[in-house]
Amino acid sequence: MLRWHRPLLFLSAVMAALALVFLILVFVDGRTLDGLPIWIKPMKFAISFALYSFTWAWLLSLRRRAGRVSRWAGAALVVAAFVEVALITFQAARGRHSHFNEVTSLDGSIWTAMGVTIGVLMLANLVAAVFVIVDRRADRVSAWAVRLGIVISTLGIASGGLMVTGVPGQTWAEDFAGAHSVGVADGGPGLPVVGWSTVGGDLRVPHFVGMHALQSLPLLALLLAALSVRFAVLRHEEVRLRLMLIAGGAYGCLFLLLLWQALRGQPLVRPDVATLAVLGVLAVTVIGAAAAALLPRREPAS
């Protein structure tokens, strides 16, 4: 870990500590917003950024040389993340919505500033990912994890745009510049902690799953490398690469399935027959492909 990006490791540690602070505040501060404790949202973002920054600290260590551009890209990720969480925390302390809120000029300014930080995160994310891919020090499994992660996370981030452009079935509250839910109004019954709607579609589900592909898939590559010490079949890079490609394809299909489900105004926890059928086909396909990838390789006859 001596080669890992230190500001990103620092960010990960700070966000992990903040997540614990926000968890305590959930029980100490009895205020709620949209039926959830007011400090749940800052806690979710702190946990997300803790994982996000830890992953990028490792990814940037895959480069042969750190490089000035990749170091600055990592620094930009740190600054943007701190600003984003600070703004969300400030609004939570005020008991106000942080996203889409344009009720007052201050709320609107904060929402605009958050849009800027999201743009910085996207750009720095893309620059850092490209540098990891083109550097020959990254092994094929890690390189493909980042490639697939870039594509899926870009789609996941783009899906968030549907919350502010609008889709059929959405209802926007007055003085709000967007909405999460489809088929119902925001603020209704939701899942514990995450708040995802249990009575209608929720675009936050595919947005969350998709945008974290660039963390999840590289972490899977790291896990496969760790498991290769214990399991002989995973010591072959070709096997790990096949498993990564299968995982990337499955992840992308899952994101599209969740997006399709949300756009039809269907809650995550109440899938219809069509959703379950597609999910079943995907699960069987992935399990079969993974089993085939793990089969012992036959040596060619002499």
Image (cartoon, rainbow, N blue to C red):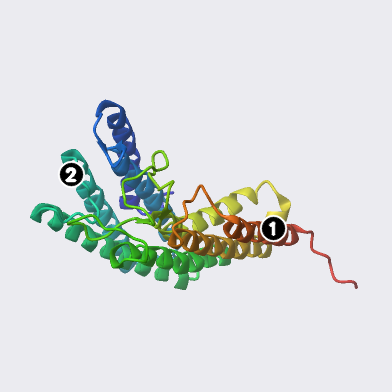
Which residue is painted at 49% across and 55% down in the image? 216
**Where is residue 66 shown, x and y percent of the image?**
37, 63
Among the 4 quarters of the image, the one containing residue 175: bottom left
Which residue is painted at 57% across and 63% down in the image? 141
Q: Which residue is mark 2?
A: 90
Mark 2 element type: helix
Q: Is residue 39 above or below residue 104?
A: above
The one of 105 and 78 positioned closer to us in this rendering: 105
Q: Please state which amino acid type lies under the numbered disc 1.
A: Val
Q: Which residue is mark 1?
A: 284
**Where is residue 30 shown, x and y percent of the image?**
25, 29
Q: Is residue 204 above or below residue 73?
A: above
Among the 4 quarters of the image, the one containing residue 273: bottom right
**Where is residue 63 shown, x and y percent of the image?**
44, 64
Q: Please state which amino acid type lies under the numbered disc 2.
A: Phe
Mark 1 element type: helix
Q: CA distance from mark 2 to mark 1?
A: 46 Å
How many C-alpha atoms fall within 10 Å of the one at disc 2: few (<14), some, or many (≥20)?
Answer: some
Q: Is residue 73 visible?
A: yes
The quadrant the C terminus occupies is bottom right
The one of 106 and 102 positioned closer to us in this rendering: 102
The one of 48 and 143 positioned closer to us in this rendering: 48
Q: Nearer the viewer, mark 2 or mark 1?
A: 1
Which residue is painted at 49% across and 59% down in the image? 261
